[in-house]
Amino acid sequence: MSKKIFLPESDLPRQWYNVMPDIPNGLEPPRHPATGKIIAPADMQAIFPDALIEQEMSDRRWIDIPEEVLRILAIWRPSPLVRADRLEEAIGAKARIYFKNESVSPAGSHKPNSAIPQAWYNMKAGIKNLTTETGAGQWGSSLALACNFFHLGCLIYMVRCSYEQKPFRRSMMKAWQADVIPSPSDTTQSGRSVLAKDPACPGSLGIAISEAVEVAAGRPDTSYALGSVLNHVLLHQTVIGLETKKQLDLAGEGLPDIVIGCCGGGSNFGGIAAPFIPERLGGAKIRFIGVEPSACPTMTRGHYTYDYGDNAGLTPLLKMHTLGSGFVPPGIHAGGLRYHGMSPIISALVREKLVEPVSYHQLECFEAAVVFARTEGIIPAPESSHAIRAAIDEARKEENTGKSIVFNLSGHGHFDMSSYDRYFDNEITNFEMPDEVLAEAAKSLPKFGFEQNG
């Protein structure tokens, strides 16, 4: 029987941990999308409330979590940490494997950890509506949940291929009173521009972001909310790692030897990994492994440079690992891992060689997901299967004998069963992104006078 380590509600973290002050050589500042100049907080007020802008740029290591936010997080937090002993036995593991089960949230993933505070801060600022994008639908359903709690309108642009592949995610968002539009759409100038060039465009997170930002910037009562990438999002997600620290102590493990998470924009990986960074900088030999799909190889084959966060160039320029904002990924089933860029925080940790990026193909990840489902009983989201694949591979290595591995199970796959059906019917294939496609996408990288590739 798998061993679950629970924490009482009283151990729910009361503060978020901000890793930015602890990143060696820091982060480079965001820049204005039109001029390339370093932006001021006022430049972001058209789409974000002041409290979130302050968190985005904060140099404080600890930031208090509002009581109203804690009361909602306590519906499912602290989430359990589980010793995956059945999985260990099935794969002949030489290391101990633990997973942090973030699938227990009402929306079935880690995403509400940031959706709840983002909605609350916007509500307190007098905002009436939020717009956003979503890929696999986990972020969209989480923001719909949060807006429902705080009586805010919610407009979601869902990447078209995921909109078609995951109808029950759409139903979930609508149950929480959100409006869902497939992207690219004819409701925005950004969407119409894409459709004029490619009427059959499957969509991308970059395109959906452009549509959501365009709507938010044009309405004074509306703000934009992002589910990953930005500093304040990773800040909110640190409740995952802070709880994991306490749970590993209760399990008698202390610090883990290896921390693993899947990487799309960086939120769930940053959430579990960031709270352990101070120990690594203090000399602890902790490995951090960020896992991305080979079909969207942002960290492993991308450029470390300034880029737009969206397709239309409406968002601030961020220094990050990126394939180029014009990159349109194939319709792989890990829809939440199809963003063209990686969080500036995670990118900087890769730059400092604190994080090891790896990539996997779809088939090997689905294989790992099925092994996990048949041993631990939880059907994982296709995104989470990337972390499972890496955990299995690491646990089998001789050099990891006797070590502890912890990975973040970022969500369940209950609304992804059509993807599993395709896997079981041998209809899913691996996709190796051609060099020429990446070279073409890189042409969309902005060219200003400031340094690009430091």
Image: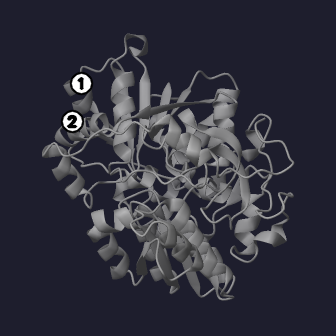
Answer with left or right where residue 288 lies relative to residue 407.
Answer: right
The quarter holding residue 160 reads bottom left
Q: How many marks?
A: 2
| Residue 371's disc number | 2
Mark 2, secondary structure of its residue = helix
The quarter holding residue 398 reads top left
Q: CA distance from mark 2 to mark 1?
A: 9 Å
Q: Nearer the viewer, residue 207 or 124?
A: 207
| Residue 228's disc number | none
CB within 8 Å, label 2 to label 1: yes
Residue 74 location in percent, x, y?
46, 65
Q: Residues within 10 Å of mark 2 (few under 14, many from 20)?
A: some
Residue 405 location in percent, x, y?
42, 29
In the rendered image, the residue lying farthest to the front is: 197
Residue 196 location in percent, x, y?
50, 72
The amino acid at mark 2 is: Val
Q: Residues within 10 Å of mark 1 (few under 14, many from 20)?
A: some
Residue 305 in the image: above or below residue 446: above
Quarter of the figure that contains the C terminus: top right
Answer with left or right where residue 397 lies relative to residue 191.
Answer: left
The amino acid at mark 1 is: Ile
Mark 1, secondary structure of its residue = helix
Q: Nearer the viewer, residue 281 or 135?
A: 135
Q: Residue under label 1, please give it.
A: 91
Which residue lies at the image location 36% right of the left edge and 62% below the top edge?
161
Q: Earlier in the sequence, mark 2 or mark 1?
A: 1
**Is residue 294 among the parts visible in the rendering?**
yes
Which residue lies at the image location 70% right of the left edge and 26% below the top edge?
282
Residue 230 in the image: above or below residue 247: below
Which residue lies at the image location 74% right of the left edge and 66% below the top edge?
53
Residue 189 location in percent, x, y?
58, 79
Residue 75 in the image: above or below residue 18: below
